[in-house]
Image (cartoon, grey):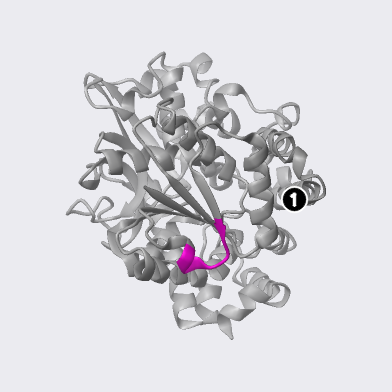
Amino acid sequence: MKLAIVGGGGFRVPQIIEVLARARAGDGPHAQLVVDHVALHDTAPSRLRAMKAVLTALDYPCSPAVSSHTDLDEALAGADFVFSAMRVGGTRGRVLDERCALEEGLLGQETVGVGGYAYALRTLGPALDLARAVRRAAPGAWVINFTNPAGIITQAMRSVLGRRVVGICDTPISLVRRTCAALGLDPSAAERNGTGTDFDYVGLNHLGWLRSLRVDGVDLLPGLLADDARLDALEEARTIGADWLRAIGAVPNEYLFYYYCQREALAGVARSRTRGEFLDAQQGEFYEAVAADPARAGALWEAAHARREATYMAEARSEDERDGRREEDIAGGGYQRVALDLMTALSTGEPARMILDVGNADSGSAAIASLADEAVVEVPCDVDGDGIHPRPVAPLTGAPLGLVQSVKACEDLVIEAVRRRDESLAWRALALHPLVDSVRAARRVLDSYIARNPLVAAVFD
C-alpha cells in the first residue's frame, strides 16, 4: 500500500513514519496497517532533504520505503491514501496572518477568524490543484486533509473529489478520550463497539461541543460538570472556566476559548510572541541546524518537537503553565493517530468510531438541519471497509446553532471569494465573522494581507 504526503517536508512526518514502522513490525494500535511506500512531496527541496536526514538519523526499524518528490503527479501516482498537509506560504505567512490582525486589535489565529481566512485565501487554489491532481494520478485514493483551516479546505476539495475527501483534527476525539479518563473510564472506550460507551459531539472544525457521554445509556457528563476535582483534569475547564461549562451543560472544543474568552486570548497573545512567530523562529533554526549538521538531525527534531508540544495554545494558559502542559492534556496522540486510525479502518475493515469533517448530509439526512447538504461539519462517524458513515446527533439549537450558522456562512463566502476572485466577498467574510467588531477594521486587515502577502494578492489579480 502506498501513502503520499503532500507537505512532506513538514514537521509531523517523523511521527507518521514512526507509527507506520511499528505497524509493519506488528506492534502498536495500527498493527494491521501495512504501508510499503511513503512518497513525500514538497515544493521546497531543502525541507525534503531535512526530513530525509531526520528519518535516516532516527532509523525506525521496519520503516516503509520513503521517497521524496517535487513533482506532484509523480508523488501521487498509484497512491492508496493521500495526506494533505501543505502549508502555503510557510510560517512566514502565518506570522502575517496573526500580526495584520493584531495591529487592528483583532485576534490573530491561524484557523479562527481573520487569520484563518487569510490562510484559507492563499491555500484554496493549491488545495483545489491537489484535488485535481489526485483525480488525475490516483483516482481511487482517499484524501485525508490535515491542512488548515480544515473545514474550509475539505469543503472545497470535496467539490472535485466528493466523499473521498475527509478532514481530520485530533482535538475532538482527544477531548472525548480525556473526558473518559476524567470519569475513570478506559480513554478509548467510546471509540469501540461493544463497550456500552457512546457520546454526542457536533459542530464545525474548531467549533464544536461534547454534549453527552453515556455508559449503558446513562449520561455521565452532568456528574462530571458538577465535580470541580474531576473537571480540573480537562484543559478546557481550566482555560475557559468550569462555571461556564456548567452554564452551557457541555464541554466545548478547546478552540472555543477564542470565542468565549476573546479579551483574555488577545491579552495572552500580547504578552509574548505570537504562535506563528515562535514556530517561524523555531523551525527556521531547526532546518538550518539540520542542513549544517545532518548527523544530528534526529536529536534536533526530537528537541524541537518537545518544545513545540509544550507551548501549544500557550495564550490560553496562566503564566505558571505557559511553558509546560500537563501530561493528560497532550495524551491524545495527535493528528497522526487520527489519520492512521482512519487509514486502518478504511483499509482493513476493522470498525472504528471517530469524529471527522464530512458532508452535512453524507448520512442521507442533514446533521445540522439549517446548513446546506454540502457544508462540511464535524460529527461522530463509524468507519469500516465500506467507507465513512456519519452517526445521528441530537439537534443543534439556540446560541451554539447561531454561532455555527454565522461561521459557516463566512466560510462559504471565503470559498466563493476565491472562486470568483472577488475582494468584496473576502471583505464580507472577514467583516461578518463573530470575532470581528468593525467592518472598517476588517477592510483594513484585508488590505494589509493583500499588500504584505503576495500569495493573498495573487488570489484577486
Work out whether residue 108 can be spotted.
Answer: no
Task: Name, please, the residue furthest toward the right.
Answer: 292
Task: Name, please, the residue furthest toward the left.
Answer: 364
399 vs 101, left or right, is left
Is 124 in the magenta?
A: no
Quarter where residue 198 is shown: top left
Is 410 rendered above or below residue 83?
A: below
> Closest to the observer: 88 or 349?
349
The amino acid on which the numbered mark 1 sits, given as a three-letter code, is Tyr
234 vs 390, left or right, is right
Element marked by disc 1: helix
Q: Position of residue 421 (x, y in %)?
A: 51, 82
Q: Residue at the location (68% across, 73% down)?
A: 444
Q: Position of residue 162 (x, y in %)?
A: 29, 63
Is 405 rendered above or below residue 416?
A: above
Q: Position of residue 435 (x, y in %)?
A: 57, 56
Task: Name, please, the residue furthest toward the bottom.
Answer: 461
> Dot 1, crowdedness within 10 Å: few (<14), some or many (≥20)?
many
Q: Residue at the location (38% across, 67% down)?
A: 137
Is 71 in the magenta?
A: yes
Q: Residue at the location (54% across, 47% down)?
A: 259
> Closest to the observer: 281 or 96?
281
Q: What residue would you read off at disc 1?
A: 287
Quarter the C terminus occupies: bottom right
Q: Position of residue 299 (x, y in %)?
A: 73, 34
> Closest to the observer: 137 or 122?
137
Work out whether residue 379 can be spotted.
Answer: yes
> Closest to the observer: 143 or 3?
3
Is 16 rendered above or below residue 323?
A: below
Q: Which residues are magenta?
A: 68-74
Quarter where residue 343 is shown: top left
Q: How many marks?
A: 1
